[in-house]
């Protein structure tokens, strides 16, 4: 994985297909950012809380797609969740992810 895909999402993953099969979209922006706009049915877990929620996400048994404003925080969240054993993908910027999965 290149450094750019780490921070801005992997364009090779079929994110729409994952969502169609029940993947969870986790928006790691602040609650205020999330309230200003987000993907329908996404959940908000700010980056500073993602470690605390990793076991919950793993127990869900579904793939997780992280997103944020630009892809940087979602890339960091992806790394944290991978270390916790969660099947996770960096979806990058939430608005671009929304376009990809519609």
Image: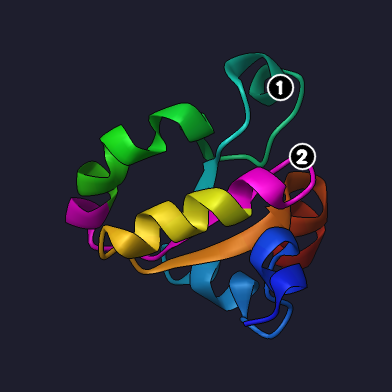
Residue 90 appears at what percent x and percent y? 59, 62
Which badge, 2 or 1, is on the more N-terminal residue?
A: 1
Residue 102 located left or right of residue 24 = right
Start and end of the magenta stretch? 58-74
Q: Check the image and report above or below for 26 versus 43.
A: below
User: What colour scheme does the image use?
Assistant: rainbow
| Residue 97 makes an appearance in the image | yes
Q: Check the image and report above or below for 12 versus 79.
A: below
Question: Is 82 part of what is drawn in magenta?
Answer: no
Label 1 SS:
helix
Quadrant of the snapshot with the N terminus: bottom right
Looking at the image, which residue is at 63% across and 31% down?
A: 29
Residue of label 2: 69
Looking at the image, which residue is at 63% across and 71% down?
A: 16
Q: Are marks 2 and 1 in contact (CB under 8 Å)?
A: yes
Residue 99 appears at what percent x and percent y? 81, 59
Residue 41 appears at what percent x and percent y? 53, 40
> Which picture quadrant has residue 81?
bottom left
Q: CA distance from mark 2 to mark 1?
A: 8 Å
Residue 63 appears at what percent x and percent y? 39, 65
Looking at the image, which residue is at 69% across and 85% down?
A: 12
Quadrant of the snapshot with the C terminus: bottom right
Tell me, for residue 4, which label it has, or none.
none
Q: Residue furthest top?
A: 32
Residue 56 located left or right of residue 8 = left
Out of 75 and 14, give the one closest to the viewer. Answer: 75
Residue of label 1: 33
């Amino acid at each position: 994985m290149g450094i750019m895909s780490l921070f801005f999402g992997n364009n090779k993953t079929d994110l729409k297909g994952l969502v169609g099969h029940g993947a969870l979209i986790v928006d790691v922006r602040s609650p205020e950012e999330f309230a200003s706009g987000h993907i329908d049915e996404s959940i908000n877990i700010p980056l500073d809380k993602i470690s605390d929620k990793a076991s919950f996400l793993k127990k869900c048994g579904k793939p997780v797609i992280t997103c944020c404003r630009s892809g940087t925080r979602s890339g960091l969240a992806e790394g944290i969740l991978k270390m916790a054993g969660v099947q996770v993908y960096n979806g990058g910027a939430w608005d671009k992810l929304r376009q990809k999965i519609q």
